[in-house]
Image (cartoon, rainbow, N blue to C red):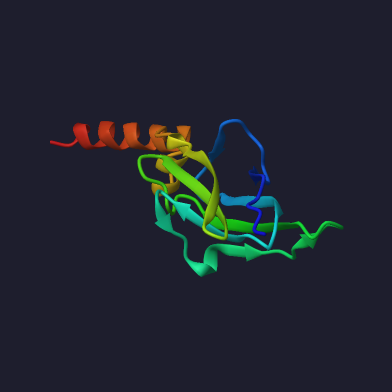
Amino acid sequence: MNVPPKQVDLSAWSNPDPLTYRSGDMVEINCTATGAKPKANIKWEINDLPVKERNLMKYSDFEDSRGRVTSKLGLRWRAPDYFRNNLARVTCIAMVGGHATRGSKNIYLDPASSAAFNHQFGAAGSQLPTTWTILSLASILIARSFP
């Protein structure tokens, strides 16, 4: 007799609520399907698209005394990949005998970090150091004094 997982739990290594990452951060999320018989076949989707094999982290299964299996599959990528408009919707699907148990989460990209990541000096601000400001003004004054 096939028993689909009683639940699918999505958990992130860092646990802010809502899940928010900055450009350059490693997004790491686990999907745990609990209580399936036989073992659940787990797959991930990001924004309704299948995930590449290189983004998956495989873990060992655990079987309890009743033969029910808990399986876990991790998902890992570096932000800002997979984000669209600062949002990535991840979905874990655990299949047993044609029955699917799903879990989804929205993950957000901090828009301020995206601008700083894409513009090397964006986070430092746009002010020049005092020395450069003085030298620039001195150059202008000297140049004005010549006819």
What residue is at 54 percent from the left and 37 percent from the top? 20
Q: Nearer the viewer, residue 62 or 4?
A: 4
Total labels drawn: 0
Residue 78: where, in percent of width, then height?
52, 55
Residue, far left: 147
Image position of 106 with respect to 23: above or below? above
Residue 21: where, in percent of width, then height?
54, 41
Task: Please state if 50 lies on the left or on the right of 77 as rendered.
Answer: left
In which quadrant of the rendered image does the C terminus lie?
top left
Residue 129: where, in percent of width, then height?
46, 35
Image position of 14 with respect to 67: above or below? above
Residue 73: where, in percent of width, then height?
63, 59
Q: Nearer the viewer, residue 24 or 142?
A: 24
Residue, far bottom: 53
Image position of 53 with respect to 11: above or below? below
Residue 122 position by quadrant: top left
What residue is at 63 percent from the left and 63 percent from the top? 57
Task: Please state if 1 lies on the left or on the right of 120 as rendered.
Answer: right
Image position of 77 with respect to 115: above or below? below
Q: Nearer the viewer, residue 40 or 58?
A: 40
What residue is at 35 percent from the left and 40 percent from the top? 85
In which quadrant of the rendered image does the N terminus lie?
bottom right
Residue 140 position by quadrant: top left
Residue, far front: 1
Q: Nearer the viewer, residue 119 or 89?
A: 89
Task: Please state if 108 lies on the left or on the right of 2 as rendered.
Answer: left
